[in-house]
Amino acid sequence: MPAVHAEKGCHRVRPAIDADPALPFPGQVRSDTFLAIEKWESMDALKAHAAAPHMKAYGEKTRDWLRIARCTYFRLRREEQGEVLKPVRVTRKTS
């Protein structure tokens, strides 16, 4: 992740895994899933990240064993500059 953290506009990228839930929500994340929580300065910074050579290399390296299960974008209202929060759910492929 050092290459991602060094990108212009990257405020934060952190992986997370499902924990033993304190509350009974349906559809808990499975053990083969992690969530990458990304915070970017702007949508332009996020687009530049997606087009970065190291992200293309990562996609090629992991395409046979990872799939993006869900990707949602949020614009943080409290931030005047319109920062973008992007949680991405990634699941290991089963076949």
Image (cartoon, grey):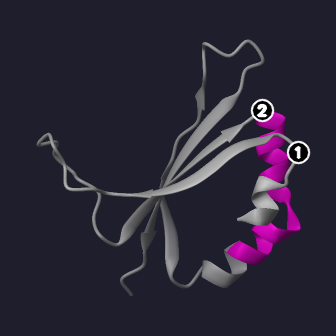
Can you say which quadrant of the picture contains the N terminus? bottom right
For residue 53: magenta?
A: yes
- Mark 1 and mark 2 residues within 8 Å of each other at the beta carbon: yes
Choose top left, top right, bottom left or bottom right for residue 85: top right
Which circle's residue, 1 or 2, is located before the other in the chain? 1
Q: Residues within 10 Å of mark 2 (few under 14, many from 20)?
A: some
**Where residue 80 sits in the image (x, y, percent)?**
73, 12
| Amino acid type, callout 2 | Glu
Q: What number is the disc on residue 8?
A: 1
Q: In this rendering, would 53 be left or right of 70?
A: right
* Residue lying farthest to the left in this orientation: 24
Residue extent of the magenta highlight: 43-58
The dominant secondary structure in magenta is helix
Task: Tell me the residue at 16%/46% (across/down).
Answer: 26
Q: Amino acid at mark 1?
A: Lys
At a point 85% along the width and 52% down the height, the residue shown is 7
Quick one: SS at disc 2?
Answer: loop
Task: Work out which quarter of the rendered image holds the C terminus and state it.
Answer: bottom left
User: Disc 1 and disc 2: Cα gap in Å?
Assistant: 8 Å
x and y, in percent, of residue 74 in the image: 57, 30
Q: In percent of the image, x 57 and y 53: which residue is there?
A: 14
Task: Judge whether 69 appears above or below 75 on screen.
Answer: below
Residue 32 location (% of width, % of height): 35, 72
| Residue 61 in magenta stretch | no
* Residue 90 horizontal side relative to residue 46, left or right: left
Horizontal and vertical percent position of residue 34:
43, 62
Q: Secondary structure at mark 1?
A: loop
Q: Which mark is residue 41?
A: 2
